[in-house]
Amino acid sequence: MGIKAKMSILLVVFTASLFLLTYRLGYHPLWDDEALVALAAKGILESGDTSVYIDHNIVAYRGGILIRDGHDRSTPPLASFIAAAAMAVLGGEAWALRLPFALLGWMTVALLFLWLWREDAPPIVWFMAAVAVLGNVSLFLFSRQCRYYSPVLFFSVASAYLYYAAPRDWGRVVLLSLSLAILFAANYLNYFALAICLGADYFLWGRKTHSFRNPQIVFLVLSQVAVSLAVLSVWNPLATGSAAALKSSGLLDKLTLLWLNIHDMSECEFVPFLFLLLVPVAYVLKRDVALLRGAVAFILYLVAISLTSPQLSVSLRTLADIRYLPPLIPLGIFLVVFSLNHIFSKKTWLVGLFSIGLFWTNVFYAGGPWYAGIRSTPVSYVMELFQPVEDPYKPTISWINENVRRGQSILVVPDFKIYPLMYHAPHAVYAWQLPKGSRDKYPTLPPIHFKRVSAPDFMIIFGPSVKEVQKAWAVEGVGVGDFELVTVLPYYWQDLYRPELFSHAFKPMVYNPHAWEEIYIFKRKGENYGKRK
């Protein structure tokens, strides 16, 4: 394949991917997990550390299980520090906080095609890879978030590239050590899974082809141990309340999670799992050891994440938290692409056409046409970029900014929906984040921060939770009759722009306004509200 043809494909891929990653990046407010990163970034800018005290509010996710000594000491810190840097330079708008993560996603795409260039892949592989990458909507959705997803993606691919590529010179070894260290600071689970894969690959193949010298191995091991201990000495989930959520569940539970991960990765169109069955066929035909190495790494990574995931019991769950698995997207894509090329090497035009249907429709993914109807997911995504769906946070934030005075308190139900409001409308006090029994741990906090101790001035209830509002109002001396409905915001209560396709909508939601599916705002009787000064 000529240089001009390769450059033409690169130009198309780089331009299109940059558009898909950055267009209308700030249209929607930060959703709850993004807002937690942004609030930690605020704490970093104010105190130099991941403080959970933000002005008159406290960020106490799940009752404060991440907190130790007034700081988030459980969450790996990289994403928050990236967001803090963006906030310091570009400001605190949603687009500014998401931008560095989107650019890391773009660098991931660039690195994948640099790898293709290095391998001198044939023209049909370049074509199919371009089709597959540009058609993988999950790759772009995860990379657009103000979260650890795109750092994990980039530094996983970078670490794999630096490990796989020869020679083993000291410059490459130092870069590999640095890339792995940054990956550790991004997410501990992803680091562990990749380390398992690299270790197994080196034992089975790497030491026979491009082995590290003994001093290089010592350097890699000691540098990783040093960095890991340094990070864990500050941000250690085992030393916070989140340790209980990390307790290992039973084997049956883990096997259930493994199956859910496979199913939901396919439903979210990470990779067409059925076509991974072509890998052993392609290996038998071509004896391409790279395929075998990639397949082993894919399986090990998936199993390692499933065994160590901190998800709660999944025995009664129907969805997996696949947010730990995006690094398998590029690996899965290239396993399928190279397998198709090896098996149908004499029918390149046919396999090229087939790849468009394979990667640009949902026909070959679990639940795709049965769950969402037959669609071209990348086309649906582009249409959504031009006509975004509405979200529940933007109108709620506007209402708070217009009607709630500084220092007035708001109880938000469900509680995880507090954080977008806290970030985008920070003048209010967000109530009831901490258990009533934890007042001794936070003696300086006003009573409004503890559940059922002090009544809030406002209640914002998202969706069906309003039906159980009596339980939420079980405050000493305050009953349902002490509150009155102020307004109902006519927007669907769920945020439909999350990166997981099973939680994502490409078109506006048609909902029943009489089925408790909107946003309900109450105030305490006698409490004034209106245009805030």
Image: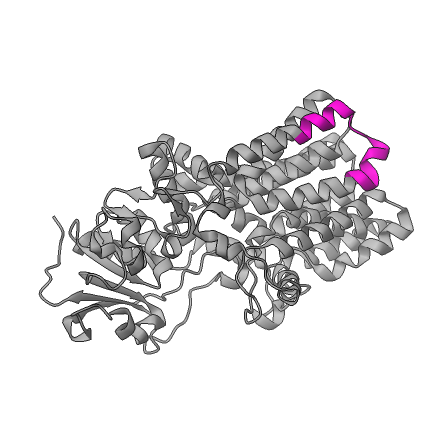
Scheme by which the image is coloured: one colour
Quick one: 183 or 214, which is closer to the camera? 214
Image location (x, y in percent) of residue 519:
30, 66
Q: Can the viewer see residue 13 in this picture?
A: yes
Rendered location of residue 461, percent (x, y): 29, 66
44 vs 473: above or below: above
- Quarter of the rendering containing residue 154: top right
User: As drawn, which residue projects farthest toward the top?
Assistant: 170
Q: Residue at x 49, y 56 (%)?
A: 244
Q: Which residues are magenta?
A: 202-221
The foreground one among 383 and 85 is 85
Q: Is residue 406 above or below residue 254?
A: above
In the rendered image, which quarter contains the N terminus? top right
- How many marks do you count on the picture? 0
Farthest front residue?
Answer: 440
The secondary structure that most of the magenta stretch takes on is helix
Look at 73% across and 53% down and name the residue there: 299
Where's residue 156, x and y in %?
63, 40
- Residue 358: where, in percent of width, then height? 70, 58
Residue drawn at point x = 13 percent, y = 59 percent: 529
Residue 449 is a magenta residue: no
Looking at the rendering, which quadrant does residue 226 occupy? Answer: top right
Q: Residue 277, relative to residue 443: is it above or below?
A: below
> Closest to the observer: 246 or 283?
246
Direction from residue 287 to residue 430 in the image, left or right: left
Does the segment drawn in magenta span residue 211? yes
> Could you say which quadrant of the image residue 435 lies in?
bottom left
Q: Position of 258 compared to 33: left or right?
A: right
Give the side of residue 23 with respect to residue 188, left or right: left
From where the camera sits, is residue 344 visible?
no
Report whether 97 appears left or right of 430. Answer: right
Residue at x 63% of width, y 47% of height:
327
